Amino acid sequence: MTHSSGAVRSYLVSRRAQTVQFADGGFNCEFAAWEVIHTENSYKFTRPQIEALARPAGLRVQHFFTDAWQYFADVVLMPHG
């Protein structure tokens, strides 16, 4: 049996050694060639998981907006009652 965590991790890779200059604050950051830069963790949940997480917070799912393939959803939560 396999288990999926629902985590999607995003990275950038510097293809060459470089210095990136940030205009605000005069901050510079150096990257080595092929250095991996972790940019984001995004967690995906199924509808039952969202419902289970909302319930103890006193919320319920009012509407699920999904794409045609149900790859993603925007969820509207409302207070119980």
Image (tube, rainbow, N blue to C red):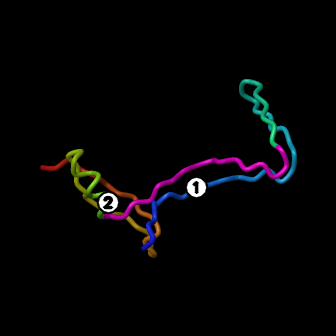
Query: For residue 49, which quarter of the picture?
Result: bottom left
Query: For residue 67, which quarter of the picture?
Result: bottom left
Query: For residue 25, which quarter of the picture?
Result: top right
- For the point 62% across and 55% down, which residue is it? 10
Mark 2 residue type: Gln
Circle 2: element type: helix
- For the point 84% across and 38% down, which residue is it? 19
- Give residue 9's mark: 1
Indicate the position of residue 23 as horizontal and vertical percent values: 76, 30
- Identify the magenta region: 32-47
Alpha-carbon distance for marks 2 and 1? 20 Å
Mark 1 residue type: Arg
Direction top: furthest residue:
25
- For the point 20% across and 46% down, which residue is it? 58
Quadrant, the N terminus: bottom left
Please name the residue that numbered disc 2 is placed on: 49
Q: Earlier in the sequence, mark 2 or mark 1?
A: 1
14 with respect to 7 (left or right): right
Direction left: furthest residue:
81
Q: Residues within 10 Å of mark 1 (few under 14, many from 20)?
A: few
Residue 40 covered by magenta stretch = yes
Indicate the position of residue 8 as horizontal and vertical percent values: 54, 58
37 with respect to 4 (left or right): right
Residue 44 covered by magenta stretch = yes
Q: Residues within 10 Å of mark 2 (few under 14, many from 20)?
A: few
